[in-house]
Amino acid sequence: MDRLFTAFANRVSALAGQPASFALATLVIVVWAVSGPIFAWSDTWQLVINTGTTIVTFLMVFVIQNAQNRDAAAMQAKLDELIRALEGARGDFIGIEHLSDSKISDIRTALEQESGCDTDSASVEESVEVLLKRR
């Protein structure tokens, strides 16, 4: 079941991100809007689009979340491998994505302080400008 859903989620995510999918969705809305006078702007006419968009949105949330979860897990595995492979890298950071948000924030703050980075927004913006000028 897991492989079947993964294959399905991959395919739907790939299709949903295509310009043709956007064009099709736009066409559906245009056809619905144009048909308004034919159905005298009835409650049923409105219910059709409301129900359809709600169902599609509800299902797409799960499909897209599945794709994002797999992408994030793959990225974490790659980063963990880089940490493991680099001499001098601290292996203690492998798996920190499983910690709470506050613990991760504490780690990030400690790393920024350790590196001597000033995290106020003016300083960060200046650093970005310096990096962009290097090009």
Image: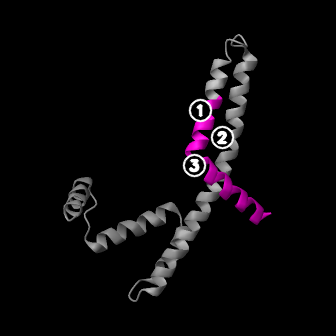
Location of mark 3 (residue): 17
Gap between marks 3 and 1 measured at Cα: 14 Å
Sequence order check, earlier mark of 1 and 2: 1
Q: Residues within 10 Å of mark 1 (few under 14, many from 20)?
A: few
Identity of the residue drawn at 53% across and 71% down: 76
Q: Is residue 45 left or right of residue 107?
A: right
Residue type marked 3:
Gly
Q: Does 74 sit above or below residue 82?
A: above
Asked if the stretch drawn in magenta spans residue 15, the answer is yes
- Secondary structure under the numbered disc 1 in the rendered image: helix
Instruction: Quarter of the image for the C terminus: give it.
Output: bottom left
Residue type marked 2:
Thr
Asked if the stretch drawn in magenta spans residue 29, the answer is no
- Secondary structure under the numbered disc 3 in the rendered image: loop
Residue 2 in the image: state x and y as whole percent: 76, 64
Q: Does 111 sit above or below residue 21?
A: below
Magenta span covers which residues? 1-28
Residue type marked 1:
Thr
| Between 71 and 87, the one nearer to me in the picture | 71
